[in-house]
Image (cartoon, rainbow, N blue to C red):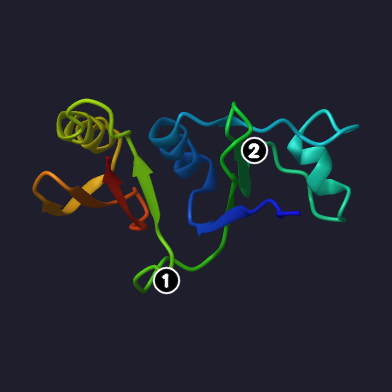
Amino acid sequence: MALRVDLTFDSVRAVELAEFWKVALGYEDEPPPEPFATRAEWVASFGEPAQDGAGGAWLRDPDGVGPRLVFLDVPEPKVAKNRLHLDVRVGRHGEPWPRVLAKVEELRAIGGRVLHTFDRHHVVMTDPEGNEFCVAA
């Protein structure tokens, strides 16, 4: 049996970074686990101080296919290149390059930055905190 995978990002502003990735991937906020009404209550159950929304964000694929994404605040900023990066895939049906470019522009509008364009194949970008990822067909 295959196991499920969560991807966890250390970040300086977890909630804001999660908003970027919701747009990038079409994800949604994951509700807190039962019986907790909020994530703050859930975090407090581990003996941590309750903070409304501060400190972390949890996202899920609304179709239940993709991995859960977790964003956790850490005190230090990103200082080196990622050893793992995400590829945001827009699909191969029809002519995909215009869809790649449209997604790149959508992500630039909300804080993404283009690093390199490999014409008609993929675009290397960073999210608002400098995490590298690619947009491709």
**As rendered, which of 88 and 107 lies closer to the eye?**
88
Circle 1 residues within 10 Å: few <14, some 14–19, many ≥20 = few
Image quadrant holding the C terminus, namely top left
Q: Amino acid at mark 2?
A: Gly
Q: Nearer the viewer, residue 17 or 5?
A: 5
Q: Which mark is residue 83?
A: 1
Q: According to the image, label 2 marks what residue?
A: 53
Left or right relative to 85: residue 15 = right
Is residue 37 positioned above or below 79 on the image? above
Quarter in which the N terminus is drawn: bottom right
* Number of residue marks: 2
Q: Which mark identifies residue 43?
A: none
Tag 2, which secondary structure? Answer: loop
Q: Position of residue 21 (x, y in %)?
A: 44, 39
The image shows residue 81, relative to residue 64, as above or below, that is: below
Which residue sits at x=12%, y=51%? 117
Relative image position of residue 75 (x, y in whole percent): 54, 65
On screen, residue 89 above or below 131: above
Q: Residue at x 53, y 41 (%)?
A: 15
Badge 1 amino acid: Arg
Q: Earlier in the sequence, mark 2 or mark 1?
A: 2
Whether residue 99 sits left or right of residue 50 in the image: it is left
Front in this rendered view, residue 73 or 125: 125
Badge 2 crowding class, 10 Å Cα cut-off, few under 14, some 14 to 19, many 20 or more, is: few
User: Furthest-left residue in view?
Assistant: 119
Q: Which quadrant of the structure image shows residue 103?
A: top left
Q: Residue at x 21, y 32 (%)?
A: 96
Q: Real-space Cα distance between discs 2 and 1?
A: 28 Å
Q: Position of residue 76 (x, y in %)?
A: 49, 68
Helix, strand or loop under label 1: loop
Q: Please tell me which residue is depicted at 58% across the width and 56% down the height of the picture.
A: 8
Tag 2–tag 1 contact (CB < 8 Å): no
